[in-house]
Amino acid sequence: MASLTIISPCNSSSSSLSSSSSSLFAGSSLSHKTVGYNQSRSRTCASNSFKCNLPQPVDIGNGKPTVPIVNERTLPKFLESARMETSVNRNGGKLKVFSGTANPALSQEIAWYMGLELGKINIKRFADGEIYVQLQESVRGCDVYLVQSTCPPANENLMELLIMVDACRRASAKNITVVIPYFGYARADRKTQGRESIAAKLVANLITEAGANRVLACDLHSGQSMGYFDIPVDHVHCQSVILDYLASKTISSDDLVVVSPDVGGVARARSFAKKLSDAPLAIVDKRRHGHNVAEVMNLIGDVKGKVAVMVDDMIDTAGTIAKGAALLHQEGAREVYACCSHAVFSPPAIGRLSSGLFQEVIITNTLPVAEKNYFPQLTVLSVANLLGETIWRVHDDCSVSSIFQ
């Protein structure tokens, strides 16, 4: 059996992080699970951590260990206990959660945290590529939550989501909430050149017209994308999950600096830095010559002898963050950490991230990470508890509202 350090996610209704967590970091009100892929690297964890035995890591041929996908057969005990508590304390009789094919592992974790079973649904492809969706249980009068990221292949997963929404609407669901951990077209949120499309608005219109009543999304590329929807949007930030993980590390506040990999991410990095005992901020100035092509120009701020934490919403080809990390090392940074919510990992991202520039690459599981993309510095944090608790609260608010209608 392989032993991995997993931080116990407490029930969100309980108090925030224990006082034994590092006072250098501000904890969040919601909790999380972390799985580290570098077993040889020692870590200092908060006092509410423990060892959880998981099946032997799978050898994928390159000598690097991987962790099995969590499912009903390998679910850690802390998730099972949380599931039993929520099933006792909350009534999910009129709430149903269905999963698309984009990230079924995350959907399963959300359902287990909520104390529910995933709804039965049949999704298949015809020979010509058309998508077929059939709900295999009644949703009449129910609040339905559809969990589907628009991750690669983005168009396939988006179309699947639209058909799922249509199936629920035609099955007389009371409310349909689309849970999109990763909103793939969020980067096309404005016109940067003439005669360009604004695909984020188009996708928002498609989801609305398909019949969705509400959207729950994680870390949109820009907050303005919420305004593209004509229905309520709950914007969930994964920042709290990453902050809780960083709280388990022994990094002095005097040695810490938060770095924005570009000027557009300054607001995100500043918010992150304030929750890290108001850590100093540095900015990497870059000039982009084309899509997925970045060139670093200079650094604004002091990183000499410090531990640099680079914060971004996503890592696609890793060109921006890798060149930024190289610049930080040139300017004298002692260690560089990369933190992001969405790990798109388009080629050649893995080669850049595993080249030795980063002490650790911290991501969340809003997108599934293929086994071939595992590397020793990678750490994956689960947002299942965050999304599960948000779904419960949205459902409770809708239930109360319906009583007074």
Image (spheres, rainbow, N blue to C red):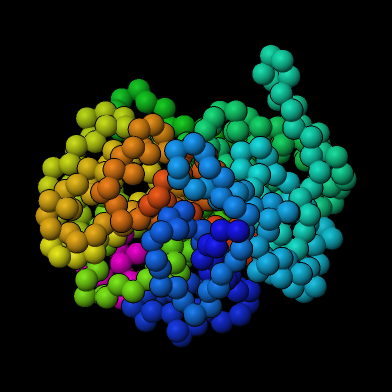
Nearest to the observer: residue 63 or residue 222: 63
The correct choice, above or below, for 364 with respect to 44 in the image is above
Residue 273 position (above or below residue 37): below
Residue at figure coordinates x 19%, y 65% from the top left: 306
Residue lying farthest top? 128
- Determine the residue positioned at 65% across, 69% down: 78
Name the quarter where the N terminus is drawn.
Answer: bottom right
Q: Residue at x 71, y 65 (%)?
A: 80
Residue 404 in percent (x, y) is at 78, 68
In the image, taking residue 203 as reference, residue 131 lies left or right, namely right
Q: Which image quarter: residue 308? A: bottom left
User: Could one spot residue 405 in this view of the protein?
Assistant: no
Where does residue 317 sit, x and y in percent of width and height?
A: 35, 36
Q: Is residue 27 left or right of residue 157?
A: left
* Res 31 quadrant in image: bottom right
Q: Nearer the viewer, residue 192 or 161?
A: 161
Figure disc tally: 0
Which stretch did the figure color magenta? 269-280
- The image shows residue 293 at horizontal and vertical percentages of 27, 32
Q: Is residue 107 visible in this depiction of the protein? A: yes
- Which image quadrant: the C terminus? bottom right
Report which quarter residue 354 is drawn in: top left
Instruction: Find residue 146 and report its horizontal and vertical position in percent.
Output: 69, 46
Q: Which residue is found at the position 46% from the left and 85% from the top? A: 19
As drawn, 404 above or below 374: below
- Choose between 72 and 26: the one closer to the eye: 72
Please say whether residue 53 is one of the residues in the magenta stretch.
no
| 275 lies left or right of 129 | left
Is residue 273 shown in magenta?
yes
